[in-house]
Image (cartoon, rainbow, N blue to C red):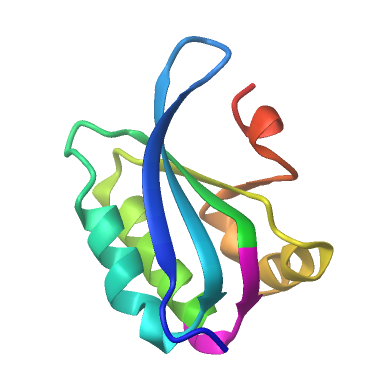
Amino acid sequence: MQATTKVTQRTATSAAGTSIAVLAFSGDISSASKEAILEAYHGLSAATTNVLLDFTAVDYINSSGIAIIIQLLLEASKSGTRKVGIFGLSAHFQKVFTMVGINKYASLYPDEQTALV
């Protein structure tokens, strides 16, 4: 398993012309990923209202990694101003995220194009 997760930030534009922050993860997501993921999320501008989490290049997510994602989503939910979407999950992790209720806090999309509609 990879010791660290790489997180890159970019901006995408929705079909409606809205600017959306994209946090793209790569590698494995585990307890070792917490600092990188939360630092990237907390580093977003306070004016950022739409965020997409890109899991396209993620190889593996363990239970600690799922807990980190839940923590991020709970923070977004409590802020009341951020809407979070998730795309690029494998079929397996789409099932896992749904089973643990992540889909209650973030919309799950098959790919970026669908998320931007």
- The residue nearer to you, when weighing 52 against 28, is 28
Residue at the limit of the structure toward the top, as seen here: 16
Q: Is residue 24 above or below residue 64?
A: above
Q: Quadrant of the C terminus?
A: top right
Residue 89 is situated, as x and y percent measured from the top left of the image, at 70, 58
Q: Which residues are magenta?
A: 58-64
Residue at the limit of the structure toward the right, as seen here: 91
Q: Quadrant of the N terminus?
A: bottom right
Residue 94 is situated, as x and y percent measured from the top left of the image, at 74, 62
Q: How many marks?
A: 0
66 with respect to 79 (left or right):
right
Which residue corresponds to the image point at 34% horizontal and 77% vertical from the top-left?
A: 34
Residue 6 is situated, as x and y percent measured from the top left of the image, at 42, 65
Q: Is residue 54 above or below residue 31?
A: above
**Residue 2 magenta:** no
92 with respect to 76 (left or right):
right
Which residue corresponds to the image point at 38% horizontal and 86% vertical from the top-left?
A: 32
The image quadrant that residue 56 belongs to is bottom right
**Residue 63 magenta:** yes
Q: Is residue 72 above or below residue 63?
A: above
Which residue corresponds to the image point at 23% horizontal and 44% vertical from the top-left?
A: 44
Residue 67 is situated, as x and y percent measured from the top left of the image, at 46, 79
31 with respect to 40 (left or right):
right
Which residue corresponds to the image point at 39% horizontal and 37% vertical from the top-left?
A: 10
The image quadrant that residue 51 belongs to is top left
